[in-house]
Image (spheres, grey):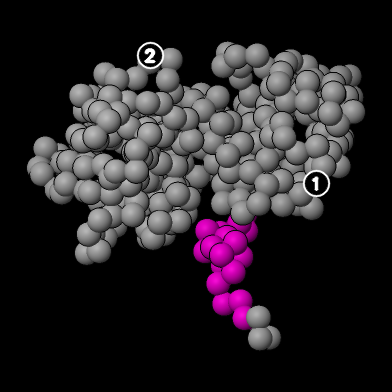
Amino acid sequence: MYASGKKHVHSLSYRVATTRQYTFKIMRIAVFGNKYQKEKSAQSELLFNVLEKYGVEISICKDFYAFLVSNMNLHPQPKQLITDNHFDADIAISMGGDGTFLKTAERIGEKNIPILGINTGRLGFLADVAPHEIENTISEIINGKYHVEERTLLQLQTKGLSTTFYPYALNEIAISKRDSSSMLTIHTYLDNNYLNAYQADGLIIATPTGSTAYSLSVGGPIIVPQAHNFVITAVAPHSLNVRPLVINDNSVIRLQVESRNTNFLIGVDGRSAVMNTQYELNIRKADYTTKVVKRPNHLFHNTLRNKLMWGADKRI
């Protein structure tokens, strides 16, 4: 089992190409991107120009490639168009916001391909490389000057979901009400020991990575990526003395949901499904991690200070 947030220098086995003059290594990079930001075409163009400059072997998600051609009038030259989850690469690049990063992580799954997030969205905790840093970042990666953080995922186990539903979450698993203004009652157990019956609009189980996402927006704590914890945060709880709870990440969380209309919504990193209250939910740590590429000087506390504007004073 990997440790959440564990850092190590990544060693890549590149395909070797040989000429009569010298031998060099070709890096394989898979590119995934946001398909809704036509105005960010200059940033995409810069990325592909830099990758071409360094002789990178590029694969591009087919849907993103079609968007580049039809909406941005960009014509990169990929070696492969990625149409399913059967692909390989040394590194994956997510071009967009944190939502695009989560979708890229889903496509990567258990492949152990590290993901670099280039932020063309808004806040960007996962996608934390700014567009003006693209050239320097790619240069660092080509020269091996980066590290890889391993991030813990949640796994949802239940009989109520389709077998095609991807049950892993890098950020959070959220339970919320559907088709009714009435609250849910969510009976919660930790390792089969009764914890609480949350009466609320919903309940969020977040990873350290997801502690700066949905959980934070409803009052949950920020947890550093290296912590071995999950956080349980209620959404608009009926009782004011209900507070977020930080637990060990080796705990198994069991949920039984009550709802007046016998159904509720389950959200797994934004992928949602309607569930019947007859089905019990079991949430635990997944048996694999998501690998995140970080620049040498990109530290989590710096990201917090910059993204959340800690210490900012409009009077100055």
SS category of the residue bearing label 1 = helix
Out of 75 and 185, give the one closest to the viewer: 185
Rendered location of residue 293, percent (x, y): 59, 43
Out of 193 and 27, give the one closest to the viewer: 193
Q: Residue at x 57, y 77 (%)?
A: 311
Rendered location of residue 251, percent (x, y): 22, 41
CA gap, disc 1 to disc 2? 41 Å
- Considering the image in quadrants, where does the N terminus appear? top left
Q: Residue at x 68, y 40 (%)?
A: 96
Circle 1 residues within 10 Å: few <14, some 14–19, many ≥20:
some
Task: Please tell me in which quadrant of the rendered image residue 243 appears.
Answer: bottom left
Q: Which residue type carries mark 1?
A: Glu
- Residue 251 visible, this orientation: no
Q: Which residue type carries mark 2?
A: Thr
- Residue 247 visible, this orientation: yes
Q: Which residues are magenta?
A: 294-313
Rendered location of residue 5, percent (x, y): 44, 47
Q: Total of numbered circles in the picture?
A: 2
Say which mark, if any, is on residue 163.
2
Task: Please tell me in which quadrant of the rendered image residue 188 appears.
Answer: top left
Q: Is residue 304 magenta?
A: yes
Residue found at the far left of this picture? 193
Q: Compared with residue 222, is residue 46 higher up or lower down, i.e. above or below?
A: above
